[in-house]
Each structure stands twice: as structure tokens, then as C-alpha cells.
Amino acid sequence: MRFSELAAPRLASLYFVPHRNRPCFRPVGFASGALFATLSLACTGRIASEPRNASPGPESHAPDSRGGAAGMSAASGASSGGAPAASCAPVLPPGAWKLTPTQIRNTLAAFAPGAEAEADKYGTVVKGLGAFSNAADRLDLSLPVTTAIVDASERIGAAAVQALAAAGERCVQDGADDAVCANKVVETLGRRAFRRPVTTSERDELTAFYRDQRASLPVGEAWAQVASALAMAPEMLFRFEVGTAGSGGRARLTPWEIASRLSYGLTDGPPDNELMASADDGRLATREGRVAQVRRLLGGASTVGARTAFLRELLPWADVTAAGKDRTANPDFSAATVTSMVAAIERRVGDWLTQQPPTWRALLTSEQGYVDAPLAKLYGLTSAAGDALAPQALGRQRRGVLTEPALLASLASFSDSRPVHRGHFVAAQLLCRDLPPPPAGVPPLAAVVAASPLAKDRLAVHTREPQCAACHRLMDPFGLVLESYDTFGRYRTQQDGHTIDPSGRLPLDDTTSVQVDDAAGLADSLASAPAARACFVAQQARWLLGAAVPEEARCWLDSLSAEFAKGDGDVNQLLIRLLTDDVTVERSVP
Amino acid sequence: MKFGRRALLGSGAAALSGLAGPFAGLTRQVWAAGITPVKRLVVVTHGHGVGSIDTADFLTPCLPASPLGGRVGPNSPTADALTGLPKFMEPLAAFTDRTLIVDGLYNLSEDTLHGSRRGAYTCLTAVRASGDDAADGEGDFHGPSFEYAISRQLETPGLYLGGNTPFNASLFASATASGSPAEIPLALDPAAAFAATFGGAEAGLDAARLKARWAKKKSVLDFSLAHLSRTRAALPAAERPKLDQYEAAIRDLEKQLAAPPSTCTATADGVRNPSVPAPLRTMEALHPALAQQLRQQTEVLVNALACGKTRVGVLQISRQTDYSIYPGLADEAHTGQEMKHDLHTLYHAYPVDDWANSWKEFAAPQPSYDGMRLRHQQFLAQQVAYVVQRLSELPDAAAGGNAKLIDNTLVLWMSDSGGQHHGGAASARAVLIGGGLFAPKRILQFPRLYVGDHPKQVDGVTIYNGNRGNNFSECYATADLFVAIQRAFGVDTRSFGDAKYCRGPLPNLT
């Protein structure tokens, strides 16, 4: 299933339409089913407090978390506050997240340099409908995956020990395996694997295992056995946020849990040395300490990959690589075009991320894009373009990331622009509209084949029929504004000899609608709309938390949204708050 | 009903032995059922329906008459002798005597018929689709799949192989898990794949060195299991299930290593063409790369069964919605031209996912698309035929004599969807082939589940719509078939999946 379908689960349900000349109905998919819309009672159209289908987060807490006394001691420093107001003091649930393949790869790079390729053995992402791939319940540790992990752990273990030896660690070499050495190697390997100091009991357990192995194996092989066990330990595969029990039914995350939260959230990798040091010396216990670390990370290039990954799932532009297109309608369209499309939007996003600060408005309204030869053809540019992507001002027709061909083509089908689907994407993904699927049992409307091929004429039926209008009025207008772009993402003013009118009135929230002339107007409207900004806050929070923000923490999200609504919407400031507010370091205790 | 891992272990451990005494515990249930015990299970599965082509043999799924002569009774299945196979199954003609077709099962676990995410695909693979139901109300199946439950009961690790699925990643580094229509490069020959899977670095070691190597591996697993248990215990109760699947898998691997090392190796007799009628070999050309890969994987699978490495195997040709483009699947009118449409589009019955145009196209038959779907289904049947062919050739060492693997192996061919589109859930079919199970050479047709309040006229058009009001008590679910198969393997269960829709073992199989 393509993510474009995943992102639109509420409309991706099955519909049945009668099939003439055949006695039975047959199922059809999203686009045609969208014709047969919903009963008005089914669609409240409310702005959801969370994106649709956000997975519920974990709900309980273990009394005995890793990190132990050290975590308590280090975390006992005074907190300096952070933003939500005193009356808003929600608590998030504890949780466990299996690392994504990218996170595993980056973790292996630190634990066993040279064995990063083994990350492929740790399983693929199992996406759910509408969920981000890093959601807490995206788990697959079935037998085939586990078999591969066990197999890979042998090579990873050997690589980890080789790396220690190469770094001059004499304790992994023959003749140097006394108790002091054993503790030292265990603490080194364990810290890299678990991204925290090993506890005393863990150290004893691992050194005992080493001694057991050493009885029959050379020093290096015995340590490789230990490292192999660490490579398949749950602490390697998972990221835990459990904390240590505190007062008032709340636990506080250990400094190393906080460090992992920051690093995996921003870099998809384990904490770097500086972050680990700030965990060790207690600096992460204060909001100032956390803010300093987040600012440091945001100032470097290490966060671009992970932040692009989030946007790639929010705006599923990469789906174009799997989308079949009718090349008879565009002979210039080729695999090279697709490659250029994806590269261009990723360059645009990469540039945006390194702006200081990157803003919501700039993401949606910048007219600066990238062009190479295939894209120049698609854009209809007459100026020469080279083989490499080069920055270029593209004008109003390409205002903002929503007008990037990769995204528009991803949201379209083989030969149709799919205005309903595009509209649903904007309403659900960018405005967090609660759009349920059409309830079953709704009889199909009579066949309507409009005389005009224009979507605006075809979709007029949705406004005529009340049971359709309840939901389609919330999404169709957005898709119709994007009708200026065909299935390939090419700009157009006409379709089959008919002039396209891309203007429309956009329902931005339950009480606000704006009239726009075209897609640029859509971009401007979303850039300013509080509902769109609040939705982005919720989506970003869900990504960073790996789960939906629970309803009881709504006040926290509201405070973030209020701040994000100011100015142009500083995304870095949003990330700082999402990662450093005091709310983020406390967990409930069941 | 959801299976608890521990409940399964508990019920299974007492009754069954492991690989060393493979079949000792199987007889209790199956003798009671009056059927021959089954030793092995092979599931061949894919997205889209099995033979669900309107113009092919299973015509008119909403009508009470079968083109094969079967009669659909009001409250009981009707079995008819299978005198000839439907068109889409022609590649399996040589195995008619061993074939039982089950038709008319429904496939849902909640009150809607959109079965693409909740249906058999989660039952037919060990991949658990978790976490979706609470959020979106679609009610995915949770818990072990039926063949996984069987492998647990038999205390044998399952072997999962795939074509356009995530499973191919473990053997063939050519995963197209995202549904990309990209061609699948071939990487390994069967013998190398078998060695990598079951021998790995151990290939070529003598018995003593093999034993030492296994001991090393087992010691790591032992330690890891103990550590995992302690970690799990320290987690909040709600988080512990996240480690359950991992813990169970490690236990499975530990048991595998506890068995005496086997030096059995793949027969490595090369990739072979299936023995099907020559005209149907053209089916191979529909997707030569996939066909070749599946043959290689079949070699790994059948040799693993022959060597006792496993007793439960899954060959997943594709999963759920298949976006593959079959290069040779052009319609007659465009022979030689590039096949434009991926299978998902093809099975939508119209070429363009365009609501307005699709309506127009629905108004006119599309025989060329029906033809393409038929050929695709025959391609699938040919892959099944090759599996059965190879099982028919390899000896069953555990049975001795002249027995072949097929004599004691059940091959279940089933789509993970009911209808031809991935969303269908009211017309699932299963093809069972093999020895020692159920009564073959029959087609068993069950009353189809009607949805809604039955045909009604809207604007002069007959429609069948709605999702309630149908009489579940007259119909049978895929879950009922799964229960029957589980029981044939000695799994003591009376329900599978959502008990609300499971009536118990599917009747009339024997």
C-alpha cells in the first residue's frame, strides 16, 4: 500500500458500485468511491486534536527502570521551568519504541563501526494506516526478523570488538583479561549499545557471561560473544522512556533517556559524546541544559536527515517513485524525471531546514526551487538547464512545497489528478480535519458523467447532494485549487479544451474560510491559518514522541500552537519546546 | 479469540514433541476427526483473489448457482465431484486427484467488508499487524497467524519466503516491500540460499566443529533470553507485550539449536521448470524474474522440508495490494506492448483510477482486462504447481519407503483477499492440495455472505450494498477453515481470530 493511501485512510475504504451487464457489484477504490460520499451525520468536520489514526501511546510505568540510582541523582537538579503555564501540567505515559532501520544503522555505526550494513537485518518498518513509521507500535520481531538479527549479531559482535582493538584497547587482546579489564570492556560496550551506563547488576551479568565464554574461547572471541549478546539485547533494539519513580505519581526520565530522546528525535541516531557528557554530569536535568543541547544539534547538519524523513512522511512526495504514470500523455516523463522530482524537493527542504530559522511560512510560500534538464521540460522552461539541479526562482506557479511536482504527482493517479484525494490530503494531513470514511450502506448516487471533463464540474455533485457535501465541502475545494497541476505535476490552464478555474473558497477551520485565486493563494492561506499551524504542531509532536499526544496533554499542545501561531512560525523554536519542556521529562506511573 | 503466546505454549508443550520426535503428538486430534495426520504445511499466498475473475470459472458470485454444477444450499455446503479444474487452475491439472477447492468463505473480523487490512493476510503470515484497530476502528487481526500457531504447536520454526514481499529480504536482497513495481534482481542460487539460511558459516563444517559452533550460538541465545526476560519484567505491564514476539522467536531459535545438528543439505539440483503443459509455460513470460525467484525459493522450501529443518513454510508471492507490473501481461489487443498497469490497477477492473471514467468503463465489459487477470491467475497457479511438483519428487525420509513429501504435506493456496480487488472479503477461496488431509477431488461450495439487506433497486440499478443485516449463521469464514487446518495438525482450538465470526472447524472437509 502506498503511503499516499495510508495517509488517506478515511477515504480509502471500499465502495460498491453496480456494474451494468453484470449481476453483482464490484469493489472499487478510493477515487471512484469518493463519488459516493458520506452521510452528513457521519462527518463532523471538526478539527481533530490529533492527526487521524494516531496510535495511542503506552500507558504504564515500571517501578524499576534502567539507569537506577545514577539517574535519580543526576536528574535531581532543579528544573527551570519551560513553557507551559502552571495550570497546565500534564504527564505523558511511559513507552518503548523499537528503533527504526535508520536508527539501528546509526546506532551500529557507533557500537560496531563497519557493521552498519547489518542494520538491514533488523527488519523493515511496518507502517500502519496514517501512522508515522516511528510510531511506538510499529513492531515486527517475528521469527524471520529475529533469525536475521541473531545471525547479524555474530558479525556485529566481532566488528565491535575489532573496533575496540583497533582503538588500542588492550583488554580485548590475549593476556589482558583480568577483572578490571572485564569491567572496563563491559562498561564501554554496554554504554555504546544501551546508550547509557550499564547498571551494576548488568555489569556483573555481562562479566559473568564473559568469564563463562572465556573458559573455552580466546579473549577476542569471548568478547565478541558478549558484544553479540549486546547487539540483540532489547536495550539495543528499543528506546525506553520509563524513568525513575518520583513523587506525586510521576516518574522522571533518566538523563540518558532524555539524551536518547533528543538525539533520536533530531538525528535518528544515538547521543553523541557531548550529549552523553551532558547526561553524565546532570546538565540535561534542567531545561536550560536541554535547550543548549537542542540548539547545538539544530545548529549542525546532523539533524537534516531525520527532519527530512519526518517531512517525507507528512508530505509523501517519495510515493512518486512507485506511482505508475500514463506516459502516452507525457512522453518526456521518465525515470530520470522522477529522480529529479524527488531530488528537487529534498534539496528545497534541505535548504529550508538550514535556514535560521526555518519557518512554516517559508516552507509553504518560498518560490525558490531546483531545476535540472528533466524538470525544466516539466516546468515548461525555455531557459537551458543542466544535468545537475540548480537553484532557481520559479515564480507564483511554484509557490511553496505543495506545488512541487513530486508531491503533486504522488497524490495523483495513473492519469488523473485526483482532486478529491489531493483535497483530502490537505484537509487531513495539513489541517488535521477529522474526516471519517463514508459509512457503509449509503446507496450510490446515480451515475453522473458531466459534459465537462473539468473536476470542478464533475465534483459539483458533491455540493448538490447533502450527504456528500458534509465531508466533501471540507476537502474538495483544496483539491480543486490544485487542479492547475496535472497528474505529472505539470502546470496547466486548460483541460481538454476547457479552461480550468483554480479559484475557490477554502474552509480552513470550522469558522473560517478564505477566497483564493489559485494554489499560491492556498499556500498563503495555509501559511497563516492557525488551524494549519496547530496541525503541524500536532504532527511534529506525534513524530517526536512516536505516539499521539494524549488528550490530557492537550493544554500543552495548545500552548505550543499559540506560540507557533506567532510571526512566521519558527519551527526550530517549536522543536526546542517539544523536546525540552518539563512535560517531556516526566512520565506517569501506573 | 486471540491466542495468548503462553496459552499456546502451554497447550502445545504437553502434547507434542519437537523435531527429534516429530509427529508423536499429532494423532490425538486428527484421529478423532477421522482424517490422516498431516505432517507439514506449505502456504502459498498473494494479494488479490484466487480465481476471482468474473469471466472465468467462478462466475456470478452473488448467484446461488455455480457454473461448475455446485449447488449452494440455504444453510449447508454442497460438495460436488471435481471433474475438471477451472481455467485459472489449469497449470495444476496433473494434481486434480489431490485437490480440494473450498469456495464461498467470507473474510472479515469486523462489521465491514473492506478486508484488505484485516483479513487473511494477517492470518496467512507471521507478521502481526498491530496497533491499528484502536486508532482507526478497522479492527486488524491481532495475535499469531494460523500457520504460526501451527508452527508453535509443532515446535518447529516456520520458514518464510517471499517474492514481492518483505520476506524475500532475508534470503534474496531484493525486497520490494513498499510495493514498488521495480524488477526483482536475482541474487542467489537455491543451494547458496539454503546454506545461508540453515548452514551459514557452518556450511562445510564437520560434525564436531558444527557442534562447537552451535554451542557458541546457543550460549549467546541462552544469555540473551535470560537478559530479555529480566528487561521485560522491569517494564511497565503495558509495554511488556512489545517484547513477547521477540522472546518467543528467540525461544524458537533456541529449540532449533538444541536439536542435534543436521548435515542435511539442499539437493541443489538446480532451478527447474515446472512440469506443466507446454502451452502454459508461456505464463512464465509474464514475469520471468519473479517466476525464477519463486522457483529458487521453492527449492529452498522443499529442501528444508525434506531435511526436517522445518515443517511449516510460507511462500508469499506478494502481499495484500500488489503494485507489481508484470512485463508480459499485455492484453491481446496490445500484445508486445508494455504492460502499463500494475496489478492493483488491473484488479480494480478499469485501467484508470478515475472516478468519472471508471463509471463509464463499468458500463462496458472489459474482456481484455479479464483476460489479463486470468493469465495472471494462471501464472500464480503455475507457481503453486511447481511447489506441488517438487514436493511430489522429493522423498519423505521420515515416512520411509517410497513416500514422497506431497503424501504428507498440505499445500494451501489462498489469497489474502477475498475478492479480486484487495478489499474484497465476501468471496474468499482456498485451494488445498496434498496428501493425508481431507477428502480431495471435490469442490466444496459454501453459501456466500450477502451483505446489506439484499438486492435493491436504486435508480433502476440492482445493487448489493450495506454491511449489516446479512446472515452470518448461514455462512462460513476463512477463520473456520483455519481452525479446521489447525486441528488437523493437532492444535486444540475451536476458534480463530475474532470469535464473533468463527463458527468452529469448517465442516464437510472429510
Image (cartoon, rainbow, N blue to C red):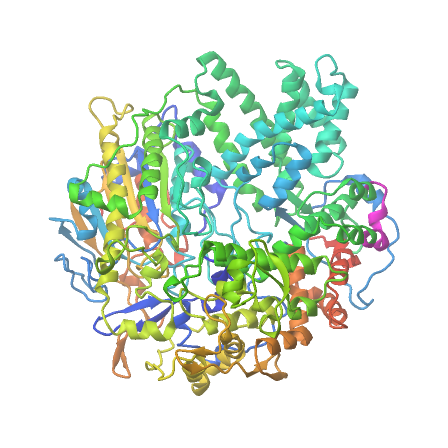
Q: Verify whether residue A285 appears in magenta.
A: yes
- Check the picture and name the quadrant holding the N terminus of chain A: bottom left
Query: Does residue B507 appear in this view?
Result: no
Q: Position of residue A255 (x, y in %)?
A: 79, 45
Residue positioned 21% across, 42% down in the render: B281
Q: Verify whether residue A290 appears in magenta.
A: yes
Reply above or below: A148 against B358. Answer: above
Could you say which quadrant of the image residue B353 lies in? bottom left
Q: Position of residue B60 (x, y in %)?
A: 20, 65
| In the image, farthest residue toward the bottom | A464
Residue positioned 24% across, 52% down in the render: B375
Depth check: give the residue in front, A509 or A354. Answer: A354
Residues in magenta, as a range: A280-291
Chief secondary structure of the magenta span? helix
Depth check: give the residue in front, B169 or B337. Answer: B337
Query: Does residue B95 appear in this view?
Result: yes
Count of numbered circles in the view: 0
Q: Position of residue B65 (x, y in %)?
A: 16, 63
